[in-house]
Amino acid sequence: MPVDPTLLRSLVERVGAFHLTDRSMLTAQRSIEAALAQGDVPQAQIRTYMGAVAHYFEGFEREARGHLRDVDRRIEHANQVVFNLSAERAVAVKRIEATAGVRAMLATSYETAAR
């Protein structure tokens, strides 16, 4: 089934906006751009180009998803650390309050005993 020429041009432009470093993808990109400039793009070339684009971007997507999983794990760990530190802080505050209460009672006892 033929590809809509407008959609093909949009795809080629969008892919062309990326910094392509893979030699085969770069070759496919330049080839399809030249064919579009001439106005005649054979269906076989379109299929080849679309296959190259699919292959190239599937790798990037896999890499990006792996990176996202790693970042999510690190965020989860950071959240757990913050939660644990908040709990430790609450315990420290309660200890300060408890010891301050004892010290206040002790001070009162010394004042009473000194009279």
Image (cartoon, rainbow, N blue to C red):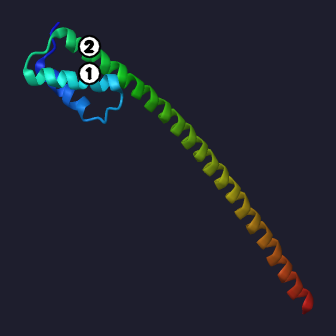
Residue 7 seen in this snapshot: no
* Marker disc for residue 107: none
Instruction: Estimate the x, y position of residue 39 in percent, counting from the top left.
Output: 7, 20
Instruction: Estimate the x, y position of residue 76 in percent, counting from the top left.
Output: 57, 41
Secondary element under disc 1, as helix, strand or loop, is helix
The residue at which mark 1 appears reads as: 28
The residue at which mark 2 appears reads as: 48
Q: CA distance from mark 1 to mark 2?
A: 8 Å
Secondary element under disc 2, as helix, strand or loop, is helix
Assign the C terminus to one quadrant of the image.
bottom right
Q: Look at 27% across and 23% down and name the residue there.
A: 27
Q: Look at 11% across and 19% down and name the residue there.
A: 5
Residues 2 and 102: in front is 2
Residues 103 and 7: in front is 7
* Farthest-out residue, bottom: 115
Q: Look at 86% across and 78% down and name the residue there.
A: 106
Residues 1 and 41: in front is 41
In-image side of 102 versus 10 (left or right): right
In-image side of 75 versus 34 (left or right): right
